[in-house]
Image (cartoon, rainbow, N blue to C red):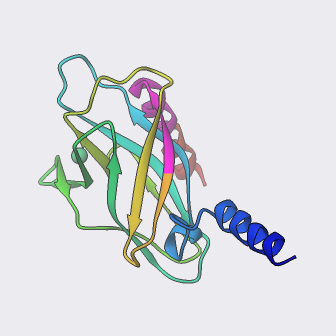
Amino acid sequence: MKLAARILMSLLCAATGAAYAAGAADAVQASDATVRLMPPGARATAAFMVLKNSGDKDVKLVKAESAVAKTVELHTHLNEGGVMKMRQVPAIEIKAKSETALKPGGFHIMLIDPVPLKEGEKISFVLSFDDGSSKKIEALASRPAAMATTDHGGHEQHKAH
Ligand SMILES: [Cu+2]
């Protein structure tokens, strides 16, 4: 009986993914994660996704890592005198019971000098949060045109309300 109980315990630990799941990592879910396919010769690309925080505490994404690029940075876009510029940010906040969209023209995860990516390829990221927890997510390599159209359509609908 003792042995059986121990086996059951270890199975439960494996099922909950003890290495990744804790705190913020449990509360935050990533959806619609995509990596923009680069035109040939481009030296950087970006990952976009919606980060939803179902927990009671505000959470900050402080780091993203991926095997497809050595340098992965958190970025935002700022409008400086009518010119959109990218800036590295130390963290991206996801408020409690809320969501933060990483999208073209706003927050994004920058991949610098990535390996060549194929359309439809799944790219793993490890997202780390300010409480020290981290989680693995997958993003789909996609063409930028489709995403830009979707994003624009969303804004138009917003104005109509
Ligand atoms: Cu950027």
Residue closest to the eye, 82 or 14 = 14
Up the image or down, 30 lies above or below 113; here it is: below
Question: At which x and y percent is residue 4?
Answer: 83, 70
Please tell me in which quadrant of the rendered image residue 36 appears.
Answer: top left
Residue closest to the eye, 40 or 144 = 40
Give me the residue at 50% from left, 49% from top: 137
Up the image or down, 84 lies above or below 96; here it is: above
* Range of residues picked out in magenta: 137-152
In the image, residue 45 lies in the stretch drawn in magenta = no
Give me the residue at 57% from left, 68% from top: 18
Question: At which x and y percent is residue 85?
Answer: 16, 48
Taking 11 as reference, is 19 left or right?
Answer: left
Work out whether residue 8 can be spotted. yes
Work out whether residue 107 can be spotted. no
Quarter placement of the C terminus? bottom right
Q: Residue furthest right?
A: 1
Give me the residue at 69% from left, 67% from top: 10
Residue closest to the eye, 138 or 40 = 138
Up the image or down, 1 lies above or below 114; here it is: below
Q: Residue furthest top?
A: 40
Question: At which x and y percent is residue 25?
Answer: 51, 68
